[in-house]
Amino acid sequence: MLKINSVSKTFNKNTPDQHKGLDNLSLNVSEGEFVTIIGGNGAGKSTLFNVVSGSMLCDSGMIELGGEDITYEPEHSRAFFIGRIFQDPMKGTAPNMTVGENLIIAYMRSTKKSIMKYPSKKDKMFIREHLAELGLGLEDRMNTKIGLLSGGQRQAITLTMATLVKPKLLLLDEHTAALDPLSAKNVLDLTNKIVLDNNITTLMITHNISSALALGSRTIMMDSGDIAIDLNTDERKNMSVQDLLIKFNRVKNKEFDDDNALL
Ligand SMILES: Nc1ncnc2c1ncn2[C@@H]1O[C@H](COP(=O)(O)OP(=O)(O)OP(=O)(O)O)[C@@H](O)[C@H]1O
């Protein structure tokens, strides 16, 4: 489904500050796979998401999604089939527009319908039903401005916006890191439900190693712009956080270094 072939990205080339964001990284993700990604500071996690979503172009290598070469496809056209959710709940929504308006715009955009046209009753029903499925009562707050909702509610809506129409790929970029622990847990539970119910191919960056091992079907650990450890479902099953840190230490011959790690 997603094939990343020997992708590299160097920043500040030919300057004393030159360094590699991605170093010949290859990764194959199958349809419906839910991969959690961890890694220390500057390991290259966000750069990986940037080159996959098109917000940055790689220097070399190839990225294929669903059999199509998207390596040099511009970000705005990838946005039709790649959903990306950021740490900041305000990113990706218009705070002065209502819940309903935000969802309608996301829906019209992903179905490539004109946003100049008034949505049909059927479209509005579809959106309302989707929101009701979250079980947060947000379907009764369609006229509330998004900016007035809590961070957790906003992330739940952003998640709905990104999955109203099933994306080919969902990128979750530490999407619960700015939330309080209870909201973070609720949003992670919702994420798990939405991803599994819809069989969405998903990559999720997290600093929480226990969540990374508990969620999804595979965990990769990045270091120095490449994948250091790649664990499938069976390999992860009985692995504790401590086991993983010991494995990293053995493979890379150094301590895992992540200021934000919530073990
Ligand atoms: N736009 C940029 N310009 C220059 N260097 C960059 C840029 N983006 C990332 N880098 C560098 O590339 C390396 C990888 O950064 P990246 O943000 O991908 O790491 P990360 O794993 O997401 O780290 P963190 O968890 O700390 O956010 C780092 O050394 C970083 O400083």
Image (cartoon, rainbow, N blue to C red):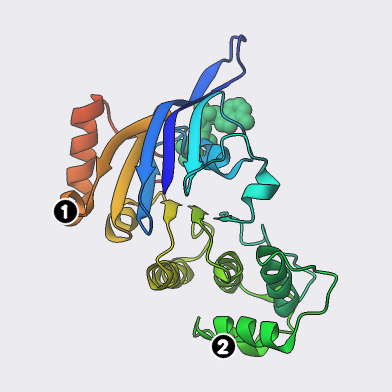
Q: Is any atom of residue 260 visible in this view?
A: no
> Is residue 245 rendered to the left or right of residue 48?
left
Residue at point 37%, 59% (across, down):
32
Q: CA separation, marks 2 and 1? A: 37 Å
**42 and 78: which is toward the camera:** 78
Q: Respond yes or no on whether mark 1 lies under 8 Å from ligand 1.
A: no
**Can you identify the residue that label 2 sits on?**
137
Mark 1 crowd level (few <14, some 14–19, many ≥20, 10 Å Cα):
few
Q: Of tags 2 and 1, which is closer to the observer?
A: 1
Residue 172 x/y as whole percent: 49, 55
Q: How many labels does the image show?
A: 2
Q: Residue 88 carries which label?
A: none
**260 and 233: which is toward the camera:** 233
Residue 156 x/y as whole percent: 55, 71
Residue 209 x/y as whole percent: 32, 51
> Is residue 144 rendered to the left or right of residue 30?
right
Residue at point 23%, 24% (across, down):
253
Under mark 2, the amino acid is Gly
**Can you identify the residue that label 1 sits on?**
234
Under mark 1, the amino acid is Asp
Residue at point 16%, 53% (across, down):
234
